[in-house]
Image (cartoon, rainbow, N blue to C red):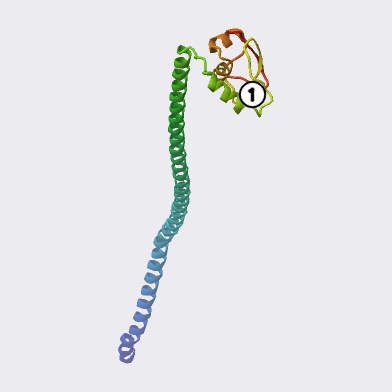
Amino acid sequence: MEDDANQSPSNMIPVALAVLGIVLGAAGLYFGLTANQRLNPIDESVSAGATSSAKIEKVISGFQTQVAEIAAQMSEQSKAVNRLRVYSSQGEQAVKKLAGELNTNREQIVKTAEMLNEFAAAGFRTAPATQLASTASNDAGSAANSVVPRAGSSYVIASGDNFGKIAGKFGVAVQAILDANPDADPRRLAIGQTIQIPAK
């Protein structure tokens, strides 16, 4: 019996160790399962966060694409505005040039009108006989003017004729020619047109 009593404590150590191992294993299993249950929501949260992050990156990428497209459109619009400015500048220059030419033409018309008024006020004096003879000899090549003109007849308009020149040829006043031809426009004489030359 003493042997059984002596052997009992030594046999108890492995049993105690085995029991302790079982307890520790059960505790480890319990803590492992508990930890796994606690980690599952964290994993899901991390996974959801990663998905959200991917979605956010996709949205940001879409915004970046839209910003690039808007920048390209703004660049095109800027080029179009620059072209319009150039065209506007060219148009302004053309208008200024045209205005200058119109002013020049207006001044020339005014000067011509003043000269005509002075010419009319002078009464269109009769050209000297030598000038008439010279004019007749200069026009000898023209069929219409080959004969020495005389007052009181009709006259066919030739190239370069005007009422002042015709009045000088016939020795009559321009006003007399105007009165004899009320339907004739002295500014629009046509070659071949017939006018009446009044008698002196």
Horizontal side of 158 relative to 127 (left or right) equals right
Find numbered disc 1 in the image and state the secondary structure of the residue it sits on. loop
* Front-most of residues 67 and 162: 162
Residue 146 screen position, x and y as percent: 67, 24
Q: Is residue 121 above or below residue 158?
A: above
Q: Which residue is mark 1?
A: 158
Q: Quadrant of residue 165?
A: top right
* Front-most of residues 115 and 59: 115
Q: Which image quadrant: the C terminus?
A: top right
Q: Residue furthest bottom?
A: 3
Horizontal side of 119 relative to 196 (left or right) equals left
Q: Amino acid at mark 1?
A: Ala
Residue 37 screen position, x and y as percent: 42, 61
Q: Which image quadrant: the N terminus?
A: bottom left
Task: Characterize the local packing of mark 1: few (<14), some (14-19) or many (20 or more) Cα atoms within 10 angstroms.
Answer: some
Q: Is residue 9 above or below residue 77?
A: below
Q: Is residue 24 above or below residue 104?
A: below
Task: Report the residue at 35% width, 77% height from top.
Answer: 20
* Front-most of residues 188 and 7: 188
Residue 86 screen position, x and y as percent: 44, 41
Residue 151 screen position, x and y as percent: 62, 12
Task: Report the residue at 40% width, 59% height from top.
Answer: 42
Task: Report the residue at 39% width, 75% height from top.
Answer: 22
